[in-house]
Amino acid sequence: AIQMTQSPSSLSASVGDRVTITCRASQGIRNELGWYQQKPGSVPKLLIYGASNLQSGVSSRFSGSGSGTDFTLTISCLQPEDFATYYCLQDFDYPRTFGPGTKVEIK
Amino acid sequence: EVQLVESGGGLVQPGGSLRLSCAVSGFTFSNYWMIWVRQAPGKGLEWVANIKKDGSQKYYVDSVEGRFTISRDNAKNSLYLQMNSLRVEDTAIYYCVRDPGGYVSGIYYDAFDIWGPGTMVTVSS
């Protein structure tokens, strides 16, 4: 199975900061990667699919990039509602695999 | 309103069985791939299995292959997960998820857009 890693595992940031989360695949996955946000006590929410395509209704503060093995999720101007855990998910091959998550906390 | 509602979770002993159900409403169920995702307490997300629109293709994570079976009944707008030979490590919230796919220039990407609230499965003696 394709292994997904994320860095950092957690970070502290302030409202208004620009935040970047990295996801790395153990082999090339083209651009077949999605990003999900999960707040405590809530179900995950789709942010981005195909590495860089913003899901309908998601704030343009979120953007994704990358191809091959290295991907990033960027939050351009962190808002209070963005404090959550973020997961990447590869859909290049079966079984699909999530990254371990990156927790974004308030500084 | 689009809804997914899981049921069937509970406490079961190791080696036991459970059948999870997911009742859907508000959309044409037969037009979508469907997925089960789980999350152990305090842990990350794990993709478990998916099933094609007509049920003709199914895929599983290695750890459940041969023990779990995903199925669907499009006439009843329902998704199922039969779980046999349950292990302590199967303890998790199980989410039913819809995948309409994200299409870009004719290429299909997974896009899990609607999630049910989940049902808790606890495997313990």
Image: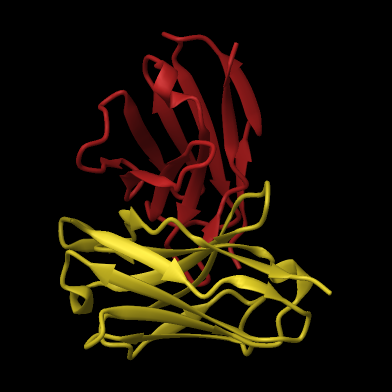
Chain colours: A red, B yellow
Q: Residue at x 66, y 57 (%)?
A: B40
In the image, taking residue A21 as reference, residue A47 lies left or right, namely left
In the image, taking residue A14 as reference, residue B102 lies left or right, namely left
Q: Residue at x 63, y 79 (%)?
A: B64
Mark yes or no: residue B112 visible: no
In the image, residue A8 above or below residue A52: above
Q: Residue at x 48, y 40 (%)?
A: A38
Q: In front here: B116 or B61?
A: B116
In the rendered view of the protein, which quadrant contains the C terminus of chain B? bottom right
Q: In front here: B79 or B124?
A: B124
Q: In front here: B53 or A81?
A: A81
Q: Residue at x 16, y 62 (%)?
A: B106
> Residue B13, position in %: x, y?
77, 79
In the rendered view of the protein, which quadrant contains the N terminus of chain B? bottom left
> Residue B34, position in %: x, y?
35, 72
Mark yes or no: residue B29 visible: yes
In the image, taking residue B23 as reference, residue B35 lies left or right, namely right
Picture mark count = 0
Quarter occupied by residue B121: bottom right
In the image, residue B16 above or below residue B33: below
In the image, residue B78 above or below residue A79: below
> Residue A17, position in %: x, y?
46, 10
Q: In front here: A30 or B95?
A: B95
> Residue B43, position in %: x, y?
66, 49
In the image, residue B36 above or below residue B80: above
